Amino acid sequence: MSDTLLSFEESLEKFDPAMGLEVHVELNTNTKMFCGCPAVFGGEPNTQTCPTCLGLPGAMPAVNAKAVESAMRIGLALNCEIAEWCRFARKNYFYPDMPKNFQTSQYDEPIAFDGYLDVEIPARSGEGTETFRVDIERAHMEEDTGKSLHVGGATGRIQGADHSLVDYNRAGIPLIEIVTKPIMGSREKAPEIAKAYVAQLRELIVALGVSDARMDQGSIRADVNLSLAPAGSGGLGTRTETKNVNSLRSVERAVRYEMQRHAAILDEGGSILQETRHWQEDSGVTLSGRPKSDADDYRYFPEPDLVPVAPSREWVEELRGTLPELPREKRARLQKEWGFSDLEMRDTVGAGALGLVEETIGAGASPQAARKWWLSDMARRANEKGVDVADLGVAPTDVARVQELVDEGRINDKLARQVFDGLLAGEGTPDEIVAARGLEIVSDDGALGAAVDKAIEANPDVADKIRDGKVAAAGALIGAVMKEMRGQADAGRVRELILERLS
Amino acid sequence: MPEITRQEVEHLADLARIDLSDAELDQIAPQLSVILESVASIKEAAADDIAPTSHALPLTNVFREDVVVPGLTAEQALSGAPEVDQQRFSVPRILGEEA
Ligand SMILES: [Zn+2]
């Protein structure tokens, strides 16, 4: 059964969206949150467990200092207050992926709270970027669950599964859950802001170095809460929580879908059921999960096996001093250094080429040359291959070397493209490819002169025009010479030789 | 006076996955009320200047270094499992729940 949707435009005419985003970040600590088991991805099933993370009797949990540090660094980078004193709490529920029958989390005493992230989005005017502030409610520490494999029924889905197979390697890996305050006033930008928030939060996490930050592997996971209220009312409607949103593109699509779905229901005079929904990557829809119910009574209480965390202000300030340059500040600095326009910078970031351009410049290329190669040639080739530009297989040092060859006059832009063909075909380094393919520009005036003479002879009428002072006509002769030289000539030098002969 | 209703006991039993008969509910509800009453008497001992506590010891910041320590082998981990399949704990399917 498919949902009825109102058009995106109509849903905005009638309603205002409010969003809440919950992002779980799996930390890249060596060990789990409360035990010394390895916290690495991809081990054989149930090879990374101990009595503590299996919830066996006699378990002795102890808090991972590094995880607390990472949590505080994330909080500080999000402009949060750091709690002077906070506790862990038990969140009680029964589910096979949680072997203790409770998740050790934080309840009303998060380690970090009241922050914000300034998110850059394309400006409404269409020129450059603008900033949208997303307020952060809290960032708290908790532990991941095990992984269930549902077998016997329809593939992987719970409905119809005969039984579930559980691997507890992931159970207990440190998680930081970052929760926004309701995001109001985003209007037509809501899907874009949601995506930009998760993308820029991810960049921040990468800059902090606290997580692998791989959405495809689940080390960053987003839940999208959405509600609609009548346009202009300033109220908050009933929300749904969409889980399983595991790519940036899906964040944007899920917000858009839920806006349109809610709008259709409300427009018909219906009401929204407060429920969990699941994003379906393949079909681009959300499916009803379960309604909020008595089972959501988690009966939190302070964790008696762990003592409170009370970070000294000295520790907090010490960690504040370790914060890296934040992505947004870095972008502003680089744009200034490189002299890029807002549009050039936006395109570079949008193409996922910021780091590549930065490295290419670091390897000696000029900013404009680096941008030109990555955003025109490389972006096009990546698009053709259906891969990210970073995964194309061309290294920034290669691009810098190709540009150096151009600057030295040994090849031109057209020949450079052939060098890139060679790089993608795995033919070696730029220098090897230039040598093997014989791409070097002919700078021998003898050979060039002969080609020029031949072109003049073949085009006497053009030659006459140039003799009469119509220098612009030289283009036709330059073209003929370049063709004769199979592109391996310096067009400027060819022009000089033509004018020498015909003046 | 704290009093726990029969419905509340039924709800809690449900959350704890404990199946209680009508007779058991009749018996347990008043008992729990008495227990709550006893616990509530602690309130009388605690003066306003004593903050509520969740721990007996005045300790904070007991941390563990982020160093791997050997845990269980898969065989050990699975040794208590009623059923094992593909080196995983095999559990009954979960009804009306999500993936
Ligand atoms: Zn463990």
Image (tube, rainbow, N blue to C red):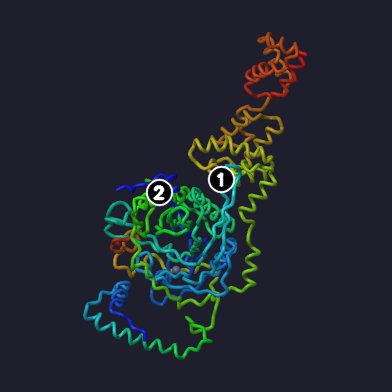
The residue tagged 2 is A260
Q: Residue at x 43, y 49 (%)?
A: A14
Q: Residue at x 46, y 69 (%)?
A: A105
The residue tagged 1 is A124
The answer to whether the residue labelled 2 contacts the one labelled 1, judged by CB atoms less than 8 Å apart, is no
**Residue lying furthest bottom:** B45
- Residue A454: % across, % down: 68, 12
Real-space CA distance between mark 2 and mark 1, rounded to the nearest whole angstrom: 21 Å
Report which quarter residue A49 is drawn in.
bottom left
Work out whether A414 lies above or below A189.
above
Of residues A46 and B9, the one drawn nearer to the viewer in this rendering: B9
Q: Residue at x 42, y 65 (%)?
A: A171
N-terminal of the pair, mark 2 or mark 1, is 1
Work out whether A8 lies above or below A306.
above
Q: Which mark is residue A270?
A: none
- Residue A3: % across, % down: 33, 48
In the visual, does B57 lie left or right of A372?
Answer: left
**Residue lying furthest front:** A233
Query: Is ligand 1 less than 8 Å from the beta carbon at label 2?
Result: no
Q: Quadrant of the C terminus of chain A?
A: top right
Q: Amino acid at mark 1?
A: Arg
Work out whether A445 lies above or below A299.
above
